[in-house]
Amino acid sequence: MPMYQPNSHGNVKLDMGSGGQVLDLQTTIKGGILGGVGGGLVCTGVKEKLDLRKMVGELESIQVPSVFICPISLDPMQEPVTLCTGQTYERSNILKWFSLGHCTCPTTMQELWDDTVTPNRTLQQLIHSWFSSKYLAMKKRSEDVLGKAVELLDSLKKVKGQARVQTLKQLRHVVVAHSMAKKTVMDKGGAALVSSLLGPFTTHAVGSEAIGILVNLELDLPSKANLRQPAKISLIVDVLNEGSIETKINCTKLIEMLIEGKDSGSENVSSLSLLAGLLRLVKDKRHPNGVLAGLGLLNTICSDESLRSSVVSIGAVPPLVELLPSLNNECLELALYILEVLSTVPEGRLALKDCANTIPNVVKLMMSKSESCTQLALSILWAVCKLALEECAALAVEAGLAAKLLLVIQSGCNPVLKQRNVQPSEVAIEFSCSCICQTGLRWVVGLRLFQSSTDVYSMSLAER
């Protein structure tokens, strides 16, 4: 149900469209603004009556005068009727009120001495006139926008140099501001036309604007395949490395669009230059949107097992570990997922182990954020500590792991924490026992932990 925002003024004033007049209800009625006869209304310049239901649906976000709003549903009235109390409602709403056994006016709660509902033709005509004016104005704007998009596409085929940059910039503004223009650009072959401008000799100014257009379109498979050509990818990566923050984000999102899904050829897109550019984007804390976009693309790249070693080789692990404490929840889960995936390759595990802040930063996140963060953190810790259990267990316990592990074990039977292949409770049991044995904690603590661990593990086996 669309939410309308009625005007809050006591004296209702109506904007009657492009004429610029603002009139109250009484003046509008007395002045003969309304046209047509009977229950309908014919607007000036309109040969046939417009459908009110359709207009209300397409203008759902517009601010509607409060006199047009039904007090029961808070939606614009299409068939207003008035009660004996003088209050007006949408016919279907007030009849439903009566069918529930009520004999009162919903607004005033007065008892009704007459349950007759009288059609309010004047208000109905006024509603239709107001919506018709707004609807026709919207349609005209839409036609102007679509015409502008087609005109710019035609110009783009002819202009060169700085004129081409300006034309692309105008087209980008149209596409970003008007969703209707996106379909028109695609239908008119705009994606192919703009893509043809990307190549080894394209200037960064043209490339930035072209990429800003393409990332806002719903690209079909042929368009994506065309953009995955090596020369075009190379230019997009160059622009990512040297452009403004907005351009960097657009490049990142476009590349992610090109490699998402099966058989997308991500190994052909993901060069070391791209990975280095993404790492610089992720490390720039001044721009949270850039960090999120960069992590999103890194996450997509890391889903390809053959590319994980390349991500590790550019030195991605230490910066990601250092970023963990400062990330918001959305970015944090992405970063942890990337680190957990990188821990599945030997180079990734070694890089995590060699980073001094891996264990302290990851331990702090356990049981302090979301359940998925706890699970990912635990999986990363276990992958790292298996490389040097005695050394890592001591560091982990010093960072406060013992208390966190007890909490994880107690919540280990939570179904949400069992969605992945590794059961956190079982990992925590094995890890906690190793930590206790390696650090020489008192045997009483070890016994209690072992007893709790055994109970949880038995319950886990029983559920299977």
Image (cartoon, helix red, strand yellow):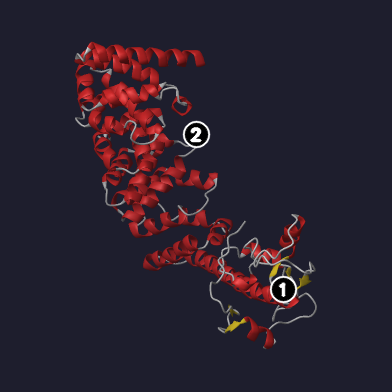
Residue 346: tell me if it is visible.
Answer: no
Q: Looking at the figure, which quarter contains the N terminus? A: bottom right
Q: Which mark is residue 91?
A: none
Q: Residue furthest bottom?
A: 31
* Amino acid at pointer 2: Asp
Residue where numbered disc 1 is placed: 124
- Mark 1 burial class by Cα count in 10 Å: few <14, some 14-19, many 20+: many
Q: Secondary structure at mark 1?
A: helix
Percent x, y of residue 191: 51, 54
Residue at the image position 48 percent from the left and 46 percent from the top: 226
Residue where numbered disc 2 is placed: 263
**Image quadrant in which you'd find residue 38:** bottom right
Residue at the image position 45 percent from the left and 52 percent from the top: 215
Percent x, y of residue 91: 74, 64
Q: Secondary structure at mark 2?
A: loop
Image marks 1 and 2: residues in contact by CB distance under 8 Å: no
> Which is more toward the observer, 363 or 10?
10
Percent x, y of residue 157: 49, 63
Residue at the image position 20 percent from the left and 16 percent from the top: 439
> Which is more toward the observer, 303 or 268?
303
Vertically, is 437 above or below 289?
Answer: above
> Which is more toward the observer, 94 or 404?
94
* Amino acid at pointer 1: Gln
